[in-house]
Image (spheres, rainbow, N blue to C red):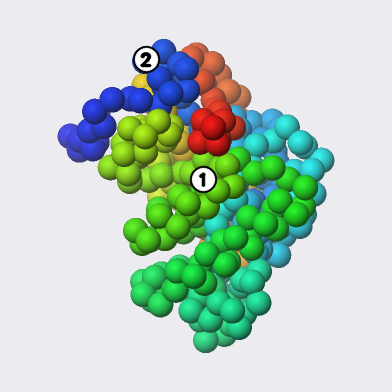
């Protein structure tokens, strides 16, 4: 193992809050970016129906969101949250707000779409909280209007919303709508757990930050080394179709995620290690109480 020490969380409180033994190893594998493209939708559905993924999050402003929502209506047992989206990262394939553009000008770049991810600092410097609230509400309401019952909120590209006031806004929306919330910062997580709200005990793993080479072996090792407490992996499966290759420079990372998530090795390692795979419904039950 490496000498880099994880931030110490004093108690693994999530297990207790969720009703598991202290030494239980709990894991939420959440597929981010549902709705971004057909290639991503098809892959996410496969990982949910044939793989080890138990949860997904939907990007309501994206071109393929309607298709993702139909897949969710066709599979009512799938747990899915709202992937709050104010970043549009692909150069040739853009999306913008569900709110009328003249109501959220601080969220838009000079082309009228959301800012690209490499301009995140500019977005966070400009974005007005009331406009973010209008757009976040519109995205949650779009999912509800489709007849779906979301489980949780998280953010696309922005860790914990990118600003403390955005985190607080989203926390308020989660409570108002009866949803759980993905939390990255261990200090925040610890605070929420003290309030009796289950959140992860360990840093959320973002699969886009893992090398594509030997990803299956890396994931399998991470499963074997999974610590006790509540863990979350944010994974990004996708197909390597012509559409995906044209849109998304990250398509090889997504294909590598998909390969592992539907592999026999993934299923067998989870079973051998006695890892409990959860979705956000078990957290939501407590957040919403």
Which mark is drawn over residue 23? 2
Q: To which quarter of the image does residue 179 belong?
A: top right
Q: Residue at x 54, y 32 (%)?
A: 289
Number of numbered callouts drawn: 2
Image quadrant of residue 120?
Answer: bottom left
Q: Could you tell me which residue is drawn at 23 percent across and 37 percent down? A: 7
Q: Left or right? Give the position of 106 relative to 279.
A: left
Residue at left 40%, top 55%?
168
Q: Which residue is mark 1?
A: 175
Label 1 vs label 2, nearer the camera: 1
Residue 132: percent from left, percent from top: 51, 67
- Residue 225's spot in the image, x, y percent? 36, 24
Residue 54 visible? The answer is yes
Residue 253 picture location, percent across and down: 51, 50
Seen in the picture, residue 16 relative to 87 is either above or below; the reply is above
Q: Earlier in the sequence, mark 1 or mark 2?
A: 2
For the residue pair 50 and 33, the one nearer the viewer reads as 33
Q: Are marks 1 and 2 in contact (CB under 8 Å)?
A: no
Residue at 55% across / 19% down in the picture? 268
- Residue 19: x and y, percent? 47, 17
Nearer to me, 181 or 251? 181
Left or right side of 101 for 77:
right
């Amino acid at each position: 193992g490496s000498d880099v020490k994880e931030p110490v969380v004093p108690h693994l409180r999530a297990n207790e809050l969720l009703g598991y033994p202290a030494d239980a190893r709990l894991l939420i594998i959440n597929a981010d970016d549902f709705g971004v493209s057909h290639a991503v939708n098809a892959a996410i559905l496969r990982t949910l129906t044939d793989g080890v993924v138990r949860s997904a999050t939907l990007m309501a402003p994206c071109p393929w969101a309607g298709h993702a929502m139909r897949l969710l209506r066709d599979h009512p047992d799938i747990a899915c949250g709202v992937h709050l989206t104010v970043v549009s990262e692909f150069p040739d394939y853009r999306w913008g707000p569900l709110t009328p553009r003249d109501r959220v000008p601080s969220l838009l770049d000079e082309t009228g779409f959301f800012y690209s991810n490499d301009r995140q600092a500019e977005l966070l410097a400009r974005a007005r909280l009331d406009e973010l609230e209008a757009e976040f509400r519109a995205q949650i309401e779009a999912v509800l209007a489709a007849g779906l019952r979301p489980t949780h909120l998280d953010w696309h590209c922005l860790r914990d919303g990118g600003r403390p006031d955005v985190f607080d806004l989203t926390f308020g929306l989660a409570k108002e709508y009866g949803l759980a919330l993905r939390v990255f910062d261990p200090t925040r997580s610890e605070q929420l757990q003290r309030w009796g709200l289950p959140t992860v005990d360990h840093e959320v793993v973002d699969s886009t930050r893992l090398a594509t080479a030997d990803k299956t072996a890396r994931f399998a090792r991470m499963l074997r080394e999974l610590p006790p407490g509540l863990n979350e992996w944010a994974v990004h499966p996708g197909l390597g179709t012509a559409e995906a290759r044209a849109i998304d420079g990250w398509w090889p990372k997504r294909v590598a995620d998909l390969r592992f998530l539907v592999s026999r090795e993934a299923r067998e390692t989870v079973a051998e290690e006695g890892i409990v795979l959860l979705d956000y419904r078990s957290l939501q039950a407590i957040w919403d109480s």
